Amino acid sequence: MIAKSVRLAATVLVASLALAACGTPVTESKLVRRGLSDLDESEIDLSKAKAENQNRLIDPKFDGKLVIVNDPIGIEASRLFFEDSDSLVLFSPDDKSILRAATLAVNQHLPAVQYDDARRLEIHKLLTDLGVSRLVVIGDVPWTETSGEFSVIKDPGTHRALGEFTAFQYGSKVVASPEQMVKDIARLDKTPHMELRPAWVPYEGELDAGEEKNQPIPAQSRRDGQMAPNIVATKDSPIANVITAAAYGGRVLVMPTADPLADKHSMAAVAGLEDGALVALGPEFGRVKEFKAKIKQGTPD
């Protein structure tokens, strides 16, 4: 038996060496991934992209559906990706607050909404419907009351507070330009415990060290169950939608353009998905019927 085992091991080793000598990889890297936009067009095989997009385990909630999220402040995205949530991040629309909200929401897997005074009642209804007990307010948001339904936690915006909220030490990443915000947020879950800061907003340093200790914001589990649909965005997509999709656990692919017929990078992200499962995170993708027709037209038979 020992001799047989040795012979078997030798056979496996020889076969492995032969494959290596032929230059045949044991596993082939995926084409449709976050780095897709960095590839040269000559490296993009749309037939392979189609096969990858179609041969995936999908949450039945999204299977066979193509959804375009038109809401600009994240209410629709929060309902789409989260059926319930103990906490929700509500942030003001300035760039510093947006990146701060992304850092906290994606790392703790919390839905996020951009505050709009005209839609305050809709936001309150969302909090009720999701069963939120903890509202985390970031930036200049006039929402200070505490009711029996949920408590309001004001983020002081310091690096120290981020650690207290999450019980982790954070590094810092400077986002180069406003055009880079969506891409860096979409990749945030690949570099966990990294605080995003805008290069175009002067860093004021830490506030008074005598600030009160902040109560923790418990992390939630990913909601995607490793079965998320393809999720696409562009640099112009509403950032609240991108934050919430990334917090859900889905991999957000940032397309160069919302028109999949304009270039192979964009087409590869959606090839074969005219009948789903696909979620597009902004109104720039147009109407569902037209978007489906473009995908079908550009997908290889």
Image: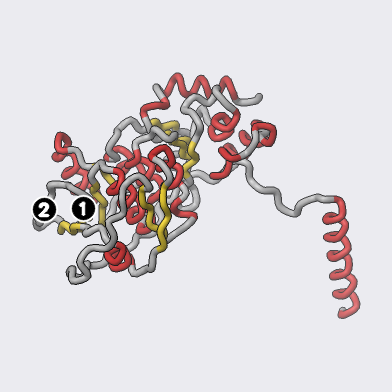
Which amino acid, by three-letter code, is at mark 1?
Answer: Val
* 275 to 246, vertically: above or below: above
Which amino acid, by three-letter code, is at mark 2?
Answer: Thr
Q: Which residue is mark 2?
A: 144
Q: Is residue 86 visible?
A: no
**Picture residue at 41% right of the left edge, 48% below the top:** 175
Q: Quadrant of residue 39?
A: top right
**Picture residue at 15% right of the left edge, 38% below the top:** 117
Q: Quadrant of residue 31?
A: top right
Locate residue 9, reporting x and y percent. Answer: 84, 70
**Does residue 184 appear left or right of residue 49 in this picture?**
left
Q: Residues within 10 Å of mark 1 (few under 14, many from 20)?
A: many
**Does residue 18 appear left or right of residue 133 in this picture?**
right
Q: Are marks 2 and 1 in contact (CB under 8 Å)?
A: yes
Tell me how far mark 2 sits from mark 1, CA to CA. 9 Å
* 103 or 82: nearer the viewer: 103
**In the current view of this chain or complex, which residue is farthest to the bottom?**
2
**Picture residue at 22% right of the left edge, 63% below the top:** 207
Q: Secondary structure at mark 2?
A: loop
Q: Is residue 147 visible?
A: yes
Q: Which residue is mark 1?
A: 137
Locate residue 191, reporting x and y percent. Answer: 47, 57
* 122 or 209: nearer the viewer: 209
* 95 or 18: nearer the viewer: 95
**Does residue 114 appear left or right of residue 40 in this picture?**
left
First in sequence, mark 2 or 1: give its number.
Answer: 1
Q: Which mark is residue 176?
A: none
* 184 to 301, vertically: above or below: below
